[in-house]
Structure formats: structure tokens, C-alpha cells
Amino acid sequence: MNALKERRILLLHPLGYPAEAAGRDISRLANLMPPLGLASIAAWLEKEGMQADILDCFAHPDSDRRLREQLRRDRPGWLGFSCTTSSFLDGVRLAQLAKAELPGLRTVFGGPHVSALKEKVLQGYPAVDFVVAGEGEESLAELLAGGWEEPAKVPGVVWRDGDTVRFSGYRERGVELDRLPFPAYEKLAGFPHAYKLPIFNYPKAPNTSCISSRGCPYACSYCDRSVFRRTFRFNSADYLYNHLAYLRERFGIRHVNFYDDQFTFHRGRVEEFCRRMIDRPLGMTFNCAVRAEHVDAELLRLMKAAGCWMASLGIETGDPELLAQHRQNADLEMLATKIRLIKQAGIRVKGLLMMGLPGESEASIRRSMDYVFSLPVDDFNLAKFTPFPGSPLYETIRELGSFDEDWARMDCMHFLFVPEGMTRERLDRLFNTFYQRHYSRPKVLLGYAAMLWRSPDSWRRFAGNIGGFIRFTQSSKRIQ
């Protein structure tokens, strides 16, 4: 039988739950994003002379069959996983399946969950051979190039040294982002049509997501910063424009969602990028996430002229005292002013909220509803607070309420943490009430009606899955 190929890796994005439930997963039906981190790593490895393939189990849930077929056909020496907390255990299961199929195969795990837990992962899960903590491109390339024989010399790696688990320490600095080749989108089966942005969050298809920066300089209590820590780096305006031009020319992309934590943090590069989009139009629009401190009327007008279609802002909660406990610069009046400026610039507004933070009460939830419904917010996303490993709150969370640390359900769609003074049942009822009140407001309904001509593809998707969406607003359950 042919030997395993030591410089070939299959990169895998696990689903996190049984494949037969994928067709009933409302979050997957509403938003199917390409695994950009794996696509970036694959492009880097190929540049370094290695072979990399990608299996995305979210886009193609029949993962067990596909995995076996690819292992038998390609015989890679490595299997790499990018895992969130909710998909980690499924990743372990697939690693066990792969090792049974190809004895001698090495497994390496990356992503926020393992970056936060590091040594604990190898101590508890024998199917995991290595962990890459932090950014993956350089560490993984060095590991595959022979560094696995002396992992202490590869920064960012956790490994077993006999009965001891060791961590080589973080890399001194992250890769310069303009040195990265464009992500290997072509290695994602069915791209771009296999992927969809959230409904009513784009005007045209095909569309995709794009990352133009890494990290966040802020330190909110609920955010896991295990991968990029407190650094913030970004692509130049030239790189960013050329990236979009590549997506337009090669794949016909018409709209891009910038999946950055802080797209406008460096004002100068956003201004330069927008001017390029105005001077040399690509026939594309874009969404981005902004923080209120880093937008103003002048910048918003420029972004609109460049094709900005929607901006998302983290509101989190409309209760000022609760917000001050968990976020820097907690100023709801300033946030409301910036939301109105975005709307006045002709850009759609999406509010990002969280329910169930430590200190949450029924009164604070009612304040959030009143606050959000007083603003010109076109769309919103309400997450169920989840204390992830690596977030500041994780270490003390059990002192602040009850926490059922069930990794497979830690997907921001279950109330696994319940603040003191609340019950899970009451949180679920208020969560449903929040959504129902939003979708029953005449102004919001008129906005969605306008999507018939502003985003016809969204309406086609909504009509095809209308039963699941309605059931979600009534039950708040992810799997319908």
C-alpha cells in the first residue's frame, strides 16, 4: 500500500452535530459562510510547496463518507481541524475515524477553542496529536515541513513529550497580512454558490465573506481573544481592492461581507479603499462591522459612495449599567447618534445584541427592547450569551450564575449560562418576545417588503424555508 504523503494535509471544518440534522438547522439555512481561515492556510501552504485540500462539513454535511473517500484517494499524512467550541467534539470524532482509516495519520487542531485551552486539549483527547495556538499559517507550514520531529522549535505548537504536554510559546509577531496570498477559494467545493450570507443582508448574489484585518484592540468581557490576542493588523487599501477585483473577475462575486471585528478602526486605509472603489468601480457592494467610536458623517458618506450597503454595530444591551460592566466606552447616547448617522447616509443598519449576560434581569431586557425599537435599526441579531474559554468572563462565570458547560451546545443559541435571579425558561420566553416584537413592527415589515426589489435572492431563500424561520421566532430553537 502507498505510504502517506507527509507534505499533504486535508483541512477540515467540522459540522458539530449529526449530519441528518443539517437540513433543519436554521442558522445554517440563514447563513452559510465559507471557512476563510482554512482557505487562507491552504493558500499559504501551497505557496510554501505543500499540498492542501479542504473539506467543509457545513457546506457538505455528509462528512463521514466524504472524509473516508478523500483519505483513501489522497492518503495525506496530516488532517487539520479548525474548531469552535461547539464543533470541537465532532472534530475529535472525525479524527478518531480518520486514524482508524489511515494508521499513522497525524492530526492537528486550531481555532479559538483549542487556542484558549492549549495543553488541556492534549491531556484529555488522545486523538489530537498537535494543537496550533494562535494564527495557523506559519506554524502549520513549519510543522508539516519537518517541525513535528522537534516541535519545541516551532512557535505556537502544543505537543506531547512522553507523558508531558508542552507548549512552545506564542510567535513573537503575526504574519504581515499583505504577504498572504488570496485565500484558496477554489478549494471550497461549490464556491461561491454553495455559500450564502444571512438573508436580507445583501442586494445581489453570488456573494461571499472576506477578512481584511485580524484582531481587536478592545477587551470586552465576553470576547475570546485567544487566536489574535490584543493585536490589530490590517491589509492595505491596495491589497483590499485587488482582493475584491480578484473575487469579481474569477468568481463573479457581486457583494462582499467584511468579516472583520473592526473594519473602520484604521480610518486612513478605509478612506483609501473607498476612493479606489469610487475611482475604479468593480460593480460590487459590501457590508462591514463598525464600532461607533470609529465612524462619522464624512466617512459614512464616502463608504456609501464606494458601495457600502449595510453596517453592523455591537449594541449588546440597551441597559447602560449592564453595558458598563462588560464593555469599554459604554455610551448608549453616542451609539444612538452614530446609528442615526449611518441611516442618514443611506446605509442599512444591523444591530448586534446579546441576552443573558451576567447581571441581566427582566428589567434590563425590557430596556434593551425599548432602546433598540427607538432606533432606525433595519435588522438585528440577538445572541444568547455564552461564556467561551478564552473570554475574560470564563474564569469566574460560575460565581455569577449557573453554567452548564456543554461544549456541543455552546453555539450562542442556547442559554447554558443563567444569571443570578433569572431562569432559563424566562430567558427563552423573553428571547422569543424580543424577536416577535421586532418582526411585528410596521416600519420593519415595510423594510423587509422593500427587499423584494432590493434583495430578491433573499426573498427566494426566505420563501423556500419560511416554515423554519417562523418556527424559530416562536421557539428560538436552532434545529427545527
Image: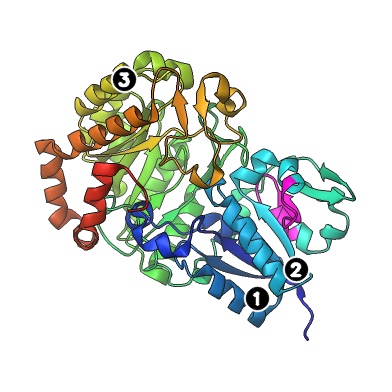
Q: Residue at label 2?
A: 105
The image's mark for residue 362 is 3
Tell me how far mark 1 sits from mark 2, CA to CA.
10 Å
Three-letter code for the amino acid on which mark 2 is drawn? Leu
Name the spot of residue 176 as percent of width and height, x first. Answer: 64, 48
Residue at 83% from the left image edge and 50% from the top image edge: 160
Three-letter code for the amino acid on which mark 1 is drawn? Leu
Kindly check if marks 1 and 2 are in contact, taking CB atoms under 8 A apart as contact: yes
Assess whether residue 450 is covered by the magenta stretch.
Answer: no
Three-letter code for the amino acid on which mark 3 is drawn? Glu
The image's mark for residue 71 is 1
Q: Which segment is the magenta one?
A: 124-141
Q: Nearer the viewer, mark 3 or mark 1?
A: 3
Taking 4 as reference, is 267 above or below it? above
Locate residue 56 relative to residue 134 in the image: left or right.
left
Q: Earlier in the sequence, mark 3 or mark 2?
A: 2
Residue at 9% from the left image edge and 37% from the top image edge: 442
Residue at 46% from the left image edge and 37% from the top image edge: 262
